[in-house]
Amino acid sequence: MATKKYLLGIFDDEITLMKAVKGVRAAGTKIYDVYTPFPVHGLDDAMGLRHTRLHTAGFLFGATGVLLMFLYITWINTVNYPIIVGGKPYFALPAYIPVLFEITVLSASVGMVIAYFVRNGLSPIRQEPPLDSRATDHKFVVAFDAEELSGEMDNVKELLAEHGASEINEKEID
């Protein structure tokens, strides 16, 4: 397995972190990721991340689920096992509505969870070690891929120090 090297800028509060992220991005340096102990409002925009398309995937999963369930219920009630219950016709659309609503919600939510895990490369089998364990407790960490920085390492360290980093570390992960 190849080792990967990261440069970590560690900050004490989110205000300093936001200023540093904006400053580093303004300098044209690519940020690998930012780790925070709680959600920081506006950090996605400051990092220049695109908006998610997970809601589109949820709509497609929900539409697929409701369509398949509608076809299944229709097939059962009209072809496979046609039986008139209480004078109800074979194709009774109002009776399908609660089931179709539930299957829409179920298929959309399960599909979005699966899409989220696949898209982000998450798995219960493979677990990545944290870059800095304090990022889940009380520190804010800006990580840079050292291979992408190549000759800019010293400039980025100076930039992080200018923007109030309490620590600047290099870390190798196997």
Image (cartoon, helix red, strand yellow):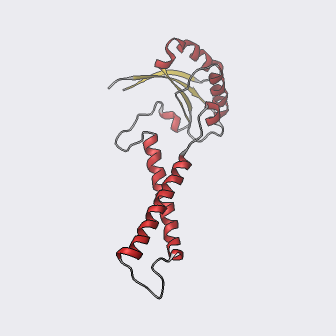
Q: Is residue 57 left or right of residue 1?
A: right
Q: Quadrant of residue 79?
A: bottom left
Question: From the viewer's perspective, is residue 110 above or below residue 171?
Answer: below
Q: Quadrant of residue 1?
A: top left
Looking at the image, which is closer to me, 74 or 161?
Answer: 74
Q: Where does the image place residue 100, in percent across and percent down from the top left?
A: 50, 67
Q: Is residue 9 left or right of residue 76?
A: right
Q: Where does the image place residue 66, in percent across and percent down from the top left?
A: 48, 62
Q: Where does the image place residue 86, in percent across and percent down from the top left?
A: 46, 88
Looking at the image, which is closer to me, 124 or 137?
Answer: 124
Question: From the viewer's perspective, is residue 151 above or below residue 144?
Answer: above
Q: Where does the image place residue 82, in percent across and percent down from the top left?
A: 38, 79
Question: From the viewer's perspective, is residue 149 above or below residue 120?
Answer: above
Q: Is residue 2 left or right of residue 141?
A: left
Q: Residue at x 51, y 53 (%)?
A: 60
Looking at the image, which is closer to me, 106 or 144?
Answer: 106
Question: From the viewer's perspective, is residue 155 above or below residue 173?
Answer: above
| Residue that protrudes farthest toward the left in the picture | 1
Quadrant in which the C terminus appears: top left
Q: Residue at x 61, y 31 (%)?
A: 47
Q: Residue at x 46, y 41 (%)?
A: 119
| Residue that protrudes farthest toward the front in the picture | 79
The number of numbered discs placed on residues in the rendered structure image is 0
Q: Quadrant of residue 37?
A: top right
